Amino acid sequence: MQISFVGANHTVTGSKYLIEINGKKFLMECGMHQGKRKESQQRNRCFPFEPESLDAVVLSHAHIDHSGNLPNLVKHGFQGPIFTTHATKDLCEYMLTDSGRIQERNIEYINKRKEKRGEELIEPLYTEADALNALSFFRGQNYYESFEVVDGVTCTFYDAGHILGSALVCLNLHDFETDEKVTFLFTGDLGRPHLPILRDPDIERLPEVDILMTESTYGDKFHKSIVEAQDKLAEIINDTAAKGGKIIIPAFSLGRTQEITYELHQLVDKNMIPAIPVFLDSPLAVNVTGVFKKHPECYDEAAKKMLEEDDHAVLSFDNFKQTESVEESKALNNFNGPCIIISASGMCEHGRIVHHLKNNIEDPRNTIMIVGYQAEETLGRKLVEGEKSVKIFDKTYKVKARVATMNYFSAHADRSDLLNFATSLKGLKRAFVVHGDTHRSIALKEALESNEVPNVMVPSWGEVYNLGVKNIEENLAPDLRMACDGEYVYDEDGKLAPADKSKLGGSGLLDHEGNPMFANTKKPKKEKKDKNVRVEEKDGKKTTIKSLGVDKNASDKKDTPDTSTFDSSGF
């Protein structure tokens, strides 16, 4: 039994982890990669395995960086069950179809420009119809009830406290060949205690765990206390309203929008802010809010009490209005006086928020309030980093509006939460650190080691590890590193580098370290020798790995369209 790391390694997007056991294969997560456009295009279109070879998918939660590439997986041949919680299944109904629509619209816009230039037209990664097809494979599961994933593997979902329906994924693995049994726990995205609406992460009910795979989004940071959030939120709103300005809040449709709505309701009830209009301008967020109302079983005690007193009190209040049509959204451009506009996407890469930023970013009376994580290379990150001008729809705008960053609302565990979680587990023999920028993953690794968590690894893209724990010392190094055509050598730092960089072969893709990545590679089975793979020791340190036999014409196949100008802003 082994695990291949093929997503969200040394980065926070595109989560994918492939487990092979008893002749079966299943994927944990199938997220969309976000960031540099060319890299995102390549990673999202190319799978480093054959989708039709998978027997199942296990999904921890509905965020697009974990679920967003599922329609593409089904489009390219996957036909197995997708196991997740009931709330996540309901959320994905809106999240994935919305993603498909956005991509269709973006490609339609791009193709109009390409057609005028006489260039070849391109296809979206997937369409709304592809998303609807993928949804037919979803299988909703209850928390705390075990179910079979494949032969020898059972799964139990525990509450992760991150977003509605999020789960800690606990796998019981039984390798029939060695008769070894291993308990493997994946955090998905671990939540924080004391967040509004949702229950806290459920740590106490977890069994003993042999192997932990933990996220590290904030592996080197401590969040500000959530109890301080209301005062800071009120200060920003009052200051902007006094100037007659608008407060523009880019917020993820799932999770952050509902938290901000809840907090604004509290501020209004306490008379901490004026009763200015609050517009939720995101059809997806409106639909997601409906799913929240459908799943009160995920609420914490405070939210349940509010719900008992008023069926609509949790996510609705006076002066709160939801816009759905394009005309209603455009009308906000001409709204006179202070107001609050909450819109998606949370990283300012696509959706109606981009139009609101375009129309408001050059007015010094206004405030752009950043309330969530911003990945590298996104418009949101550029605003947070204080860039004086930014490009929106290929036009440069000066940033004259105030940019206020609110780090209080993160739904991700911080360094302290992650350490508390890991050190509370009993029986732990090994840990993999994923889903974090490199410096943050390494910082968490070092902190875990300082707290006596044994055998902590930060895997790189394409590394394959044995999951056995009987002889743990023999299984600490990667079994094999996926490679492309040509010779590749491990350097003294343990990084795989091409001996001849002109021989990239395959899709010619590179990972975050500049190492080759590719599509449609089949790793040879361990018990058979493959003439295309050889391992040699050189000077007692370096190992050379030859080609795994990538299809050099993979990029020319009909189901792999040209991606040279695909607009990943739809991600």
Image (spheres, grey):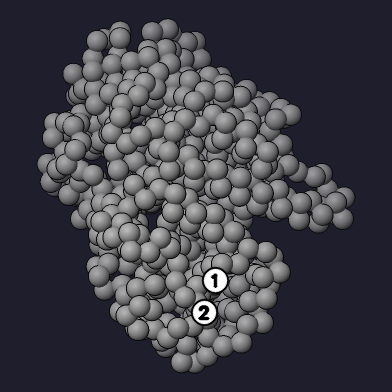
Q: Earlier in the sequence, mark 1 or mark 2?
A: 2
Q: Nearer the viewer, residue 405 or 509?
A: 405
Q: Say whether residue 301 is left or right of residue 423.
A: right
Q: Which of the 4 image quadrants contains residue 321?
A: bottom right
Residue at point 62%, 37% (across, down): 132
Residue at point 47%, 50% (across, down): 291
Answer yes or no: is residue 40 visible: no
Q: Which mark is residue 513?
A: none
Which class describes the residues within 10 Å of circle 1: few (<14), some (14-19), or many (20+)?
A: some
The location of residue 55, given as percent across then percent down, is 48, 20
Residue under pointer 2: 277
At label 1, the amino acid type is Lys
Residue at point 71%, 36% (across, down): 561
Residue at point 31%, 72% (across, down): 229
Q: In the rendered view, would you say 344 is above or below 163?
A: below
The location of residue 233, given as percent across then percent down, is 37, 77
Q: Nearer the viewer, residue 372 or 95?
A: 95
Q: Quadrant of the N terminus?
A: top left
Which class describes the residues within 10 Å of circle 2: few (<14), some (14-19), or many (20+)?
A: some
At label 2, the amino acid type is Pro
The location of residue 310, given as percent across then percent down, is 38, 64
Residue under pointer 1: 321
Q: Say whether residue 305 is left or right of residue 358.
A: left
Proximity of marks 1 and 2: CB atoms separated by less than 8 Å: yes
For mark 2, give the secondary structure. Answer: loop
The location of residue 318, given as percent across then percent down, is 47, 75
Q: In the rendered view, would you say 467 is above or below 417?
A: above
Q: Say whether residue 472 is left or right of residue 501.
A: left
